[in-house]
Amino acid sequence: MRVGHGFDAHRLVEGRKLILGGVDVPHTTGALGHSDADVLAHAISDALLGGAALGDLGTHFPDTDPQWKNADSMELLGHCRAEVHRAGYRIENVDATIVVQLPKLAPFIERMRANVASRLGLSVPQVSVKAKTSEGMGYTGDGSGIAAYAVALLEAI
C-alpha cells in the first residue's frame, strides 16, 4: 500500500468558469489557470501521481506547453489514472477537501464524487469530496482564491 498527497490552489477571477470535479459551479468568479483550473481534479491527480512516485501534474502536463491550454482537467485525471496503473498500482480510495468561502458547494458534491469515481474506475463510496470554508481567513476566505487537498491510497497490483 502507498499513500499520495495532493494540493492545488488557483486565483478566483471574473470571466472564468468555476469547474470542480468536472462540475460547472455557478458563481461570479472562476479559477484562473492554464487548463480549466479544476483544483479538485488537480489535487487528486497530484495525490495519485505522488503515491506512485511519478512526479506531479506540472511534470506531466506543463503549463508552458500550449497543448494543455484550456485542457479538461478531468481528462488529465484519467491520464494520471492510466499512469498509476502502468506503474503497477490500483487506486483503492480518494479523499479530497475543497477550501473556499463562496460559493456553497453542498449541492454539487455528489455530482463531483460521481464524476471523479467514473473517471478513476471506482465506485462512488471509494471517493470522498468535502467542502470547507476558512472562516473568512486568507485567500480562500476573502474570495480571491480556492484550494483543494487530496489523499489517495494505492495498492500494488
Image (cartoon, grey):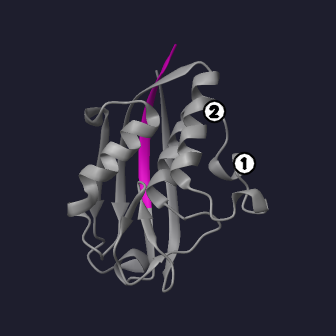
Helix, strand or loop for disc 2:
loop
Q: Identify the disc placed on residue 53.
A: 2
Write the start and end of the magenta stretch as one range.
148-157
User: Can you tell which quarter of the image residue 71 is in?
Assistant: bottom right
Let me know if residue 39 is in the magenta part.
Answer: no
Q: Give the residue type that dot 1 points to.
A: Thr
Helix, strand or loop for disc 1:
helix
- Majority secondary structure of the magenta segment? strand
27 relative to 130, above or below = below
Residue at figure coordinates x 31%, y 49% from the top left: 129
Q: Identify the disc placed on residue 67.
A: none
Looking at the picture, how far across and down is residue 100, in whole percent? 35, 71
Residue at figure coordinates x 42%, y 47% from the top left: 150
Tell me, yes or no, if residue 46 can be seen here.
no
Q: Which residue is mark 1?
A: 59
Mark 1 packing: few (<14 Cα in 10 Å), some, or many (20+)? few
98 or 123, which lies in front?
A: 123
Q: Earlier in the sequence, mark 2 or mark 1?
A: 2
Q: Is residue 78 left or right of residue 19?
A: right
71 relative to 31, above or below = above
The Cα atoms of the two marked residues, 2 and 1, are separated by 12 Å
Contact flag, marks 2 and 1 (Cβ < 8 Å): no
Q: Give the residue type that dot 2 points to.
A: Ala
Looking at the picture, how far across and down is residue 85, in whole percent? 57, 24
143 relative to 19, above or below = below
Residue at figure coordinates x 41%, y 54% from the top left: 21
Let me know if residue 152 is in the magenta part.
Answer: yes
Farthest-out residue, left: 107
